[in-house]
Amino acid sequence: MLIIGEKLNSAIPGIRQIINDKDVAAIQDLALRQVAAGADYLDLNTAQCNEVADMEWLVRTVQEVTNVPLCLDSTEGEAIKKGLETVKGDKSKVIINSISMEKKRLEEVLPFVLEYQCPVIGLTVDDNGIPKTAAERLKITERLLETLRQENYDLDKVYIDPLVLPLAVNHTHATMFFQCLTDIKRLFNVKTVSGLSNISYNMPKRKLINRYFLTICMASGMDAAILDPLDRKIMTAVTTADLLLGNDRFGKNFLKAYRQDLLED
Ligand code: THG
């Protein structure tokens, strides 16, 4: 499964401070530690700061120390634009996080997806909000994919995020999410992604719930996750689930993680 490291997000209070302080060493340390821990991509979010200017600074600062591809996490066209302009190297590798069927967001961000032909995360939300049922989320997925198809965009580059809602609000939120993942694969054959941690909102033992949720999502066909790669237990769950799901030929990655003493009981 593709790992998108979540740590460089201004919604995390400590990170907001680091971005406001322009603490280059702290950002670069977090970038390098996430990559060393197995992140395939780094998510960058400056929404709680001076979004556009800080996105430019963050992209530059991260790319000074690593070539790992970036996932630009913003709902604002201007921040995505600035991020893309700043990225050096292959811009068509950048994941744009995200578009949706919300009219304003689609109009603002879609042009950059098309200009650079980037992979894109599509949220199952429209101007009526996040639908309550799996069926309605599939309808939005269908409309989003149709919009992209009309623009001759390669649908292999789409990651649909069916959006996790807290279990504490409704005990069916997790099963509905698994249903979305399997249905999106079966009906549309596109990739899926999730941010996971909303599932445990307002519950004790959040990390425990997140970890079990992750493995069921993987078994339901999830292709990518935005998570904290510095959490050894969640990374152990990813490595072990990939082994069990037949995504790890000869157990090569599992054995490598074992030899590096990365697997936690
Ligand atoms: N979907 C998409 N994008 C997203 C989300 C999503 N972007 C934002 C968010 N959800 C995913 N990113 C984060 C980033 C940080 C945390 C949660 C989600 C967070 N981190 C704590 C920390 O680092 O201190 C705790 C980490 C931990 O559990 O160990 O809370 O859903 N498309």
Image (tube, grey):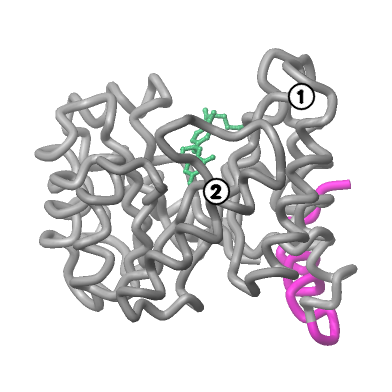
Q: Is residue 203 above or below residue 184?
A: above
Q: Is ligand 1 less than 8 Å from the beta carbon at label 2?
A: yes
Residue type pointed to by label 2: Ile
Position of 194 compared to 75: left or right?
Answer: right
Q: Which is more toward the observer, 76 or 240?
A: 76
Q: State left or right for residue 62 relative to residue 163.
A: left
* Spatial CA span between label 2 and label 1: 19 Å
Q: Position of residue 189 (x, y in %)?
A: 65, 74
* Residue at left offset 30%, top offset 50%: 106
Instruction: Please determine whether, in this image, residue 10 is positioned above or below residue 248.
Output: above
Specify the amino acid type for callout 1. Answer: Leu
The crowding category of the residue bearing disc 1, from other C-alpha atoms within 10 Å (few below 14, some 14 to 19, many at least 20), is: some
Compared across the picture, whether 73 is left or right of 3 comes to: left
Disc 1 on helix, strand or loop?
A: loop
Of the 4 image quadrants, the one containing the N terminus is bottom right
Residue at label 1? Answer: 167
The residue that label 2 is drawn on is 226
Residue 197 lies in quadrant = top right
